[in-house]
Structures are given as structure tokens and as C-alpha cells.
Image: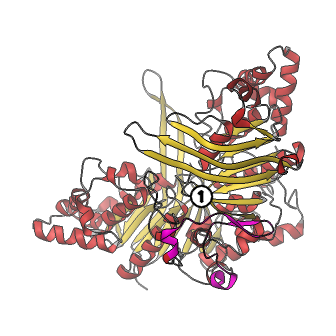
Amino acid sequence: MSEPILKVVNLKKHYPIRKGMFNKQVATRYVVDGVDIEIMPGETVALVGESGCGKSVLLRVLLGIEDATEGEIYYYGKNTKEMSKQESRRIRKKVQMIFQDAASALHPRFTVMESLSEPLLLGGMKNKREIEKRVCETLEKVGMDASYRFRSPGSLSGGQRQRVLIARSLVERPELILADEPISALDVSLQAQVLNLLMDLQDEYKLAMLFVAHDLAVVRQIANYIMIVYAGHILEAAPSSEIYSNAHHPYTQVLLESAPSISRGVRNEDFHLNLKVGDAPDPANPPSGCVFHTRCVYADERCRTEVPEKREISPGHYACCHKAKTAKEFAQEGCADGKGGCVKS
Amino acid sequence: MEQTNHDILLEVKDLRTYFHMPDGVTIKAVDGVNFTLKKGRVLGIIGESGSGKSVTSRAIMQIVDRPGKIETGEIYFKGENLLDKSEKEMASLRGSQISLIFQDPNTSFNPYMTIGDQLRQAYRVHRRSAGKEECEEAVRDALKLVGISNWEEVCKCYPCQYSAGFRQRIFIAMAMIFKPDLLIADEPTTSLGITIQAEIIQALSDIKDQVGNSVIIITHDFGVVAQFADDIFVMYAGRCVEYSPKRDLLVAPRHPYTVGLLRSVPLLEVRKTRRLKSIPGFPPDMAHPPEGCPFAVRCEWAQEKCFREQPELVQISEDRLVACHYPLMDYETAQDTRLD
């Protein structure tokens, strides 16, 4: 078995909340709280979670924009903490990021050419002609005419800007791409274009990808392995076919139910959300026990007090839940409000 | 004839709203829209950004901002043409009979007023002489309608104390305080997370069951309309390209654009084709709309006639309308849109 490109062990990121004259730390925001990830070459792992669950912070920590509070990050088996400057620079060439908001991720005064050649210059490429050749090649790879290199981001449409952003992440020929909701800011028809583009590029360059999204429908086509994030914790992780057919965590089941479904509309099925009305917990004040218990309809005393351990359900399929069961089993048991329906608090 | 039909709440005929820009360019944001909405039904308007969905809703409320202007058209609400009404008469309709919910719950509230004060103020707009108790009662009813039971506590708080999803819920309560017959929801869930989105849709459909109002929901998300709407209206480049009951449209779309949209939606269900088929190209520039069918350049079925003549919206079966010279048949699209 080959070595994983990226391996993350028990990663935590906490932000202190400071107050008062002496900047005393009064509380802590537990934004990412114990995350394990492993990405093999050529594999796509998707992180799925709602806004505010800590997905973006996690990516920033992985890229080294922010330091982890606790936990290890290994690239190619090497711990980031023990890397020399040169090594980490070399790793950074191989790990690139696509940001969510293309409008703010591109420098407004730089032409496309300048934006795309910047990483190459930093990477030590000096020959101007070579740089230009590489930029043109990459632009064509993402489906844009090479003449776009003279344009500024302001004169491009949203979809084109997203393509430039993808081109920028590809220009150094990376092996791992961290994509932070690359399509959620786009229109439906463009979403499909960009998703297809990412899949094509992946086939061509054998890229590994960590794909962040907020719903399960988007990653169905692209991901091999899916991890469900909620309030900084991984609640369920499984190969993608397992997630869609055999989800064991109540939160995953809720996400599946609330994802856009055309066939449900066709069948005119009534739609019930099996979730207590409320919000995701405040990271400064996380609930005791299971993080999801405040909204879970199956929660009981044990969930309120005891933090659930990671349990293996089948090879590669893990869930953090005391009651992990498939939706069918939950319904059969008919336990506390488990018959469906929105429970109002 | 149709105006005497009591089932019809809203009828829009040939609505055109243009924006006359200072540099002399005219942007035809809405360019001939027709539809009818029956009482108690939910109409979903779907389209890409810039297709004129929001401008249509604003034109119905007559709150199109300058330099936008309603050029022609008739908007019959309960048999009366809204465009003939004076501003004073319109003002008395807004909020009491027709309400609008916006996309962004953050900017819809005054941050310096408590939620209770804002709801009471909304109530006093149309009931100026309302006493304190009458106000309280209306506010309580409205908040209960959206599933907020601890209304007394909520009223004392400021909008910033709640999350976006909860604020949107309160905003719906405010829009429903007079139990209007028509609620227009302009992308009510776009900025929200996915479970919160499902909660809001659930709240909207609960309200509809209790009050019996009609709803126009504007969105670019097929999942939302598939779950909530009765009829679907697809907009492209300021015009209606397809109007049909939900089920027929999802199962057997007739307009190439609808087909394109449907097959580019990422779905939970497995499709026969692994790749999504996207619509190539971009929507046209509405300052210079093309001569023929606005979708022709992106349409894989386009023929020579499509580039010359703009197709009219024609009836193709009892309750389906399509604006296409060559509407598609089931067997042409089945492979791409049918699910496993």
C-alpha cells in the first residue's frame, strides 16, 4: 500500500476569547476539535458540513496559514512541525488551494497572466517565455482561451473567474488540491461546468483532492470518501456509496433528507425533517456529551453526558454516535419522535 | 372572461420592465412575462441569476428602483389591475394583501429596534389606531404561526441575538402579520445552510396550510421548487420559457433550457451518466438581446429558424406552455434526465 499524501491526526484548533484591560483569556472557541483525515494519491475526500462547522478553518490549518492548537499534520509521511523551511516550501508547491469566493481571491489589479505567474515566480521559475507557455497551457486546460491572460478579473464573469482560480491552483502541477466550496457561489448551470472540469482535471493529472461542500448532493459525483463535519467534530466517515445507502448517524440522515431531491418532488412525497428546530451549537460553549444532542431527535440521557466514541460499523465506515443505526432501523424502533416530523422545541 | 374566474388570484400579462441606464443603454430585464396564479397554490419561479426573477416580483409589488420602469403590461390581483392603482392605493395593499420576503435576513431588520417593536410597527402601518393589546395579539399570532412558541422572550431581543435562520423565520412572521393572500418569497433560503433551508421551507408550507395563502417562491434551486411548489415557471433572459405543473416539468421537460438545468443539478440519486451535462456558454447580455430565441446559441437542438425568430409562449397541452419552435419529446431527453 502506498503512503497517504496527507494524514491528519487528532487536529484541534481553538481560538481564545480575550477580554478586559489585560487581555485575559475568558473563554475558548473550539472551532476544530479532534479531526482525523487520510488522503491517498488520486483519491477525493469530501468534507461535508453546514456553515460555521469549522470546515474552512480546518483547510487554513492544513495549508499552514494558521497553526494548529494540537495534533499532527503529515504530508508524504513527514510531520509539518519537523519540516525545514525548504521542505515546507517544496510541499507547498504540491498542495494548492481553491478558494470559495473567486471575486475576492484574485487580485483586482493583476491581469490573469500576473495572477497565474505569481506562484511560478515564487516557485523559482525564471524564464519568462517558459512561464507564459505554462500559463497559456493551464488556461486552455480549464477551458479558457489563452487570450484571456491579458484580462483583469473585473472583466470576467463569475464562472470564468472560478476557472482562473482553478488554473492558478493547477499552474504548479500540484498533487493535492484543497477545494473550499469551489462551486457554491456559482449558478446551477455553471456549477455543473466547474464540477465536470474538476473531474476531468483529476483524471488527467491523477490529483488527490480534499473537497469541502455544504451538501451531500454536490459531492456524490466526485468523492470517494465522505466525512460529515458538525461543530468541529467528524460525526460520520465512510466510503461514499456507504454514506448514501447506509448512513448510520442521525445527522447524516438529516443531511440526506434535506438535500435537493427531484424524485421526491416527482413522487409528491411529503417532506419531514427529522430534526429539532434550532441552531448549531456555539463553538465557545459546546454542549456536553455528544455535540449533536441539542438537535437530535433520538438523544437521551447518555447522549447528554457521555461523549460518543468513534465506532467502526463496517471496514472504513465510522460513526460517532451512541445509537448509530440506519434510518430504517430508527423508524422501525419508533423511539422518541423517531416517526419523522419536525419536532418544535 | 378570466378575470371573473374566482379561482385566479394573480394574473400577469405581457409584463415588461426595462432599465434605462444613464449612458443610453436599455436593459430589458423582464421582457414579456405571462402567468396566472390560482388561490392556495404555490408557484415556483426558477432561473439563473440575471434572468429577471427578482425584477418580476418587484414589479408585482411596484417597488422597482430607478432607473427601472414598468413599460407595459397588466397585473390583475383579485381582478383589479395593480398598474392602474395610485401609489396610495398600492401602499395600502403592500403588507396587508401582498407581502415580500427578501433573501438576506440580516439587512431586512433595523438593528437598533427590538423584534417586538419592529413587528408592532409593521402592524401599525395599516392599523394606525390599534391599541396595545390588539398589537400584542397580532404579534403573538404571527410568531406562533412560524413556530416560535416563546414569543414574549423573542420580542424583547434584538435581531443580532439570533442566527440567520431564526431571523428569516421572524421576517416571515412579519410578512404574515396581516395574513396576506399572496406571499412572494425572493430566494428565501439561498444564504442559509441546508438543514436551516429545509426548516424554512417546512415553516412556509405549514403557514400555507394554516392560512391558505398563495405563494410565489423565487429560487435557482430545483430542490426547493421540487419539494414545495405546485407549478413551475422557468425564466430565461427576461422571458418565460416553460410553465407547467411541477410533476410534468420534472418528469418530461419540453424546453431545451429546462432540460439543461435539470441535468446540471447535482443530485442525491444516481444518474445513468456519470458526468453532469452542463449548459455550455453564458446567458445573453440583456442590453443587446439576440434577435431570435435567446437560448439558441447555447441550445444543442437549435436549428436555423431559432436564430431568426423569437418563439412565442404557446400552449402545448391543457396546462403546459412552452416557448420553443421545436419542443422536445420524452424520448429525446429521457436518457439524460431520467433517474435510476
For the N terminus of chain A, give its image quadrant.
Answer: bottom left
Quarter of the figure with residue B233: bottom right
For the C terminus of chain A, give its image quadrant.
Answer: top right
Q: Position of residue B63 (x, y in %)?
A: 62, 34
Q: Position of residue A286 (x, y in %)?
A: 63, 44
Q: Nearer the viewer, residue B67 or B270?
A: B67
A282 to A268, vertically: above or below: above
Q: Nearer the viewer, residue B320 or B332?
A: B320
Inspect this view and state whether residue B138 appears: yes
Q: Chain of mark 1?
A: B
Q: Nearer the viewer, residue A249 or B5?
A: B5
Q: How is the image coloured?
A: secondary structure
Quarter of the figure with residue B336: bottom right
The residue depicted at 39 percent of the width and 56 percent of the height is: A157
Left or right of A189, for residue B198: right
Left or right of B218, for residue A14: left
Q: Amino acid at mark 1?
A: Gly
Q: Position of residue B51 (x, y in %)?
A: 55, 54
The residue depicted at 66 percent of the width and 73 percent of the height is: B254
Q: Residues within 10 Å of mark 1 (few under 14, many from 20)?
A: many
| Range shown magenta | B305-334
Which residue is denoted by mark 1 in the rendering?
Answer: B47
